[in-house]
Amino acid sequence: MPHKLAGAEHSVRQALDFIPQGIAVFDHGLRLFSCNRRYGELLSLPDALLRAGTPLFDIALYLADRGDFGSGDPARLAIERINTLTAAPTTVTQRIDSLGQALEFHSSRLPDGGLVISFADVTARVRAEEELAQVNQSLERRVEERTAALTRVNAELETARAKADAANHDKTRFLAAASHDLLQPLNAARLYTSTLVERAKDTSLAELATSIEASLTAVEDIMSALLDISRIDSGAVRPAPAPFNTIDLLKKIEVEFTPMARERGVRLGIMPASATVMTDRMLVSRIVQNLVSNAVKYTRPGGRVLVGTRRRGNRLRLDVIDTGIGFNKDQHKLVFAEFSRLDHGARMAQGLGLGLSIVQRLVATLGLSLELDSVENRGSRFSIYLPLARSITPAAANEAPTSEASFGTLDLKVLCVDNERAILEAMDGLLVHWGCDVRTALSLKQIDRERLLEGWYPDLVLMDYHLEQTSGLDAIEWLRQNVGGHLPAALVTADRSPAVRALAEERGVAVVTKPVKPATLRAVISGLASQSGRQPRR
């Protein structure tokens, strides 16, 4: 057996001598254990340095003295070379020796602390790379010439793009400026119509009044969707993440959509779960509003819409589930496209098919995930994943009412301030019909000049934001200083910018966006009345 082992070892050594790479093995003390013939040939080492037990330092010092490591103190150069080979578990280095040949070294540390070094002569490869570099230099000159031509073309394209951006910016500014003027008369029309609908009940005009209200609602939905898409695409929508509790959002959705679901014969189920998430509350609310609105619209009478949440790791999944018309997998992308509506959906509800397009844009703006699962004729599930907040007190939701609006008499004193007389007249008609004692004014000057508040203390104030000489928020502060510091107030505005909402939240003022939805307005008024200690009569 020893004879066979010796024979095998001899065969291995003989085979290693025919390998074109130099190979050497050093023990844990960095003394030569074994090497092949090519190792000595490539390094041109004397036989004395190829004996077993030779320290690696002696070999490195010999090469340093010969000039293989460049100029400098040989001992220092030898130590630096050894450090390079042993600094990591595996290393790859390349150097030019004193004879001008390029050698590439691969070194690996062994489990017992030893070292294996293999290297090869790569002079031919290095020369080929140098020749290739010269060819590349020639190509680079040609590329520079082409690049100069492309730069000129790109400059022309940039000029054209700048003009297009300027036009788009002008369009966005126009829409932002026009939205207030467009929504103001629509707001007045909605308020007048709401009063007409309530007064025309059980009369021959009821159907006509309801049709007018439905038409105005469709116009409002289309205008709001177009304005939202314009603001998102122009980059005007900038998320402002803050912690908030989802229970506030879900209660607001319940109040806003219960009347709509009841009218369509759809059961709306809200599963109020308390969880604090970190994202933009207003934008998430817009997403959920669009999803719930779609779910109610495309669910047949007798069907059901369910809104709830589930924890998924460090995220919260908010689901909007319906038993509506659904769609197949081939139509998933189609439902998110602008102005795209499925045939059976178009027969069920009016609109331009912009709701889900807005949802997709807002989800991308917030960096959230959107999940869709749908079966044709059975229903759909839309889910968004919200990041959970950690140990942070959520911000109060000023605009989230706590319960569905009562349909009884409000019996409240309400001050309305708006710079549009038509809106004041419409608001007065609606609130008086609800049993309120209403006083209206176009400005603070009118309130002061006509002494509207003498002997009359309002339970709450509904204030327009864009007044002629001041902002609605400043006007509310003036009223609180002169009437009472705890005067509940709501800002009624067509301005949907996050900055206005943020300012309102800082001052404890609820926000109602124009065109005003009567159900939402009534719910907000009920919430403000509870702040003042007054409760509407049921």
Image: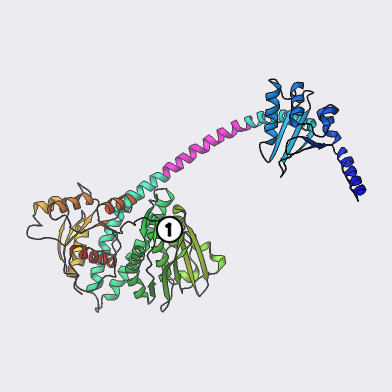
Q: Nearer the viewer, residue 461 or 248?
A: 248
Picture quarter containing residue 104? top right
Where's residue 158, x and y in %?
Answer: 50, 38
Q: Name the residue under label 1.
A: 388
Where's residue 391, x and y in %?
Answer: 38, 56
Compared to residue 509, the image places residue 311 above or below, namely below
The span shown in magenta is 145-167
Asked if residue 226 shows in the view, the reply is no
Q: Judge whether residue 382 is colored magenta.
A: no
Question: Main structural element of the magenta stretch: helix, strand or loop?
Answer: helix
Picture quarter containing residue 81? top right
Q: Nearer the viewer, residue 352 or 59?
A: 59
Give the class, few, some or many, for how many residues have Cα within 10 Å of label 1's Cα (few <14, many ≥20). many
Task: Give the secondary structure at mark 1.
Answer: loop
> Would residue 154 be found to the left or right of residue 209 on screen?
right
Compared to residue 130, the image places residue 491 above or below, namely below
